Image (cartoon, helix red, strand yellow):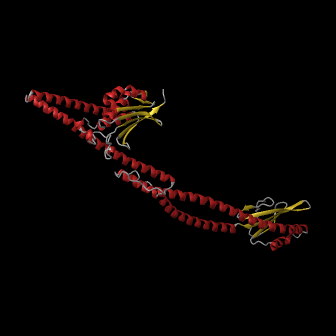
């Protein structure tokens, strides 16, 4: 089911929001321009009438004072310089004395304040009071129609509307181009996620030139894609490792079981001399011990894989003293071929499990070292870590063996072959125990010959 069905695209939504915002801005700008222009035109008309009024006031005073009322209106119209001006004169009682023919009869407009104007019945109106020697004589109104102003405002509104429509069209087209170009990285990110959903893990989207937010989204999707690809790769490697481990374990278990089964058949048939039967019994005991050791090592690895911390009982230990305490055990393994060097350093360890690591490394080194060679064990600090080094004087480790040295059931040379007692699990157990301590183990060759195994552990302050 597609949840996007019937929904507008992001491109249309962004363009629509841009146009809506522009319409609002243009509407506000158009209304503001209309009101300002209307105010300017009204003020201009009122200023013209005020100028006419300033010219006519002395004439009116002269006419009224000399009782030339009859000739008042013609004199007024003769002095008008602005076209379309209407006039109305009322006496002190408010009765109309003279007015333009276009004005309605017996109707008086409002009297604006001095220097101001009023809009009345489609006209701009100005007025002045007439006085003679402190006596109120009457009122004079001058008016002009607002039709020309309305015409100018209408033409301006039409022109502004046409320009606004042109701007909206241009912005819509340019916005569509720019938004599509801006959202192009988003389309690539969407395509990448669809590829990931289709199983094409490791696909990445090119977002180097994208805006910051889209770049962050693309980088997050790319990291997710690479992480998913890496996760599946590690899963495949783990599955292959598991299959190989099961095959190797089955092979290692089958060999001693087949030997024991063959000797048991020999005993069941009661064939062979007493010496042959004794040798068969000895061989069965040897294969049984080997089988027991293999099962024990597999169980150890299984427990370390499942819950490494539960297999350890760690405590603060001074490693040089710990090595000295176990020197008799090590001497029993290597005798005078061992050289011990120790400097004080503290670490949080399981003493027995860490000694198992050292014993395993020492046994491995002794197998590689000639009878007259020496195996050296060094313990001491290195920066913020404790270091345990086991050096031998053997032939070293071949370069193609080093990357696989700590793999389970891996045998790189004859020294680790089945006839020497090795099953390929010793170094794997060493690696698992060291990592359970929070440390690391590595192997390399010394410049002057021989192999070196190094264990690093987190050092602690003396308690």
Residue lying furthest right:
133
- Residue placed most toward the observer, 236 or 53: 236
Q: Quick check: 441 left or right of 143?
A: left
- Is residue 307 visible to the viewer in this orientation of the structure? no
Q: Give x and y (percent) for residue 418.
A: 23, 37
- Residue placed most toward the observer, 141 or 81: 81
Residue lying furthest front:
372
Q: Quick check: 77 left or right of 147?
A: right
Q: Quick check: 27 left or right of 121?
A: left
Q: Give x and y (percent) for residue 274.
A: 10, 26
Image quadrant assignment for residue 453: top left
Q: How many marks?
A: 0
In this view, 61 is above or below 307: below
In this view, 364 is above or below 173: above
Image quadrant assignment for residue 417: top left
- Residue placed most toward the observer, 235 or 446: 446
- Is residue 181 visible to the viewer in this orientation of the structure? yes
Q: Quick check: 166 left or right of 332?
A: right
Residue in the image at 37% along x and 42% along y: 446
Q: Give x and y (percent) for residue 160.
A: 61, 66
- Residue placed most toward the observer, 366 or 249: 366
In this view, 365 is above or below 281: below
Residue in the image at 42% along x and 29% along y: 320
Q: Give x and y (percent) for residue 459.
A: 45, 33
Residue in the image at 41% along x and 52% along y: 4
Residue in the image at 50% along x and 56% along y: 14
């Amino acid at each position: 089911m597609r949840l996007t069905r019937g929904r507008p695209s992001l491109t249309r939504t962004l363009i629509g929001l841009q146009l809506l915002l522009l319409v609002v801005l243009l509407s506000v700008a158009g209304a503001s321009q209309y009101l300002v222009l209307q105010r300017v035109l009204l003020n201009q008309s009122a200023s013209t009438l005020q100028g006419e009024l300033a010219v006519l006031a002395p004439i009116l005073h002269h006419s009224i004072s000399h009782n030339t009322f009859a000739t008042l209106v013609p004199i007024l119209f003769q002095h008008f310089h602005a076209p379309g001006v209407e006039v109305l004169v009322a006496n002190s009682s408010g009765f109309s004395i003279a007015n333009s023919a276009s004005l309605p009869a017996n109707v008086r407009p409002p009297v604006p304040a001095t220097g101001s104007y009023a809009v009345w019945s489609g006209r701009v109106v100005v007025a002045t009071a007439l006085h003679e020697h402190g006596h109120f004589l009457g009122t004079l109104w001058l008016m002009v129609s607002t039709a020309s102003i309305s015409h100018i405002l209408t033409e301006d509104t039409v022109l502004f509307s046409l320009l606004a429509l042109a701007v909206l069209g241009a912005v819509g087209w340019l916005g569509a181009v720019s938004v599509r170009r801006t959202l192009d990285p988003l389309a690539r990110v969407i395509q990448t996620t669809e590829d990931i959903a289709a199983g094409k893990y490791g696909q990445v989207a090119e977002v180097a030139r994208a805006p910051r937010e889209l770049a962050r989204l693309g980088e997050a999707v790319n990291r997710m894609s690479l992480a998913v690809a890496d996760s599946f790769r590690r899963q495949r490697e783990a599955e292959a490792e598991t299959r190989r481990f099961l095959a190797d374990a089955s092979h290692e278990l089958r060999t001693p079981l087949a030997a024991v089964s063959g000797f048991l058949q020999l005993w069941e048939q009661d064939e062979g001399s007493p010496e042959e039967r004794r040798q068969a019994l000895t061989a069965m005991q040897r294969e049984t011990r080997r089988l027991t050791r293999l099962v024990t090592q597999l169980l150890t690895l299984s427990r370390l894989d499942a819950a490494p911390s539960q297999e350890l009982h760690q405590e603060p230990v001074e490693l040089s003293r710990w090595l000295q305490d176990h020197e008799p055990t090590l001497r029993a393994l290597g005798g005078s071929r061992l050289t011990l060097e120790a400097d004080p350093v503290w670490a949080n360890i399981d003493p027995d499990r860490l000694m198992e690591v050292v014993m395993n490394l020492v046994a491995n080194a002794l197998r590689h070292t000639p009878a007259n060679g020496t195996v050296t064990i060094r313990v001491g600090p290195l920066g913020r870590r404790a270091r345990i080094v086991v050096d031998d004087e053997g032939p070293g480790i071949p370069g193609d063996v080093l990357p696989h040295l700590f793999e389970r059931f891996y045998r790189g040379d004859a020294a680790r072959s089945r006839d020497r007692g090795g099953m390929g699990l010793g170094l794997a157990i060493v690696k698992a125990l060291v990592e359970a301590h929070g440390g690391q183990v590595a192997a390399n060759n010394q410049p002057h010959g021989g192999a070196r195994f190094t264990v690093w552990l987190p050092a602690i302050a003396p308690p």
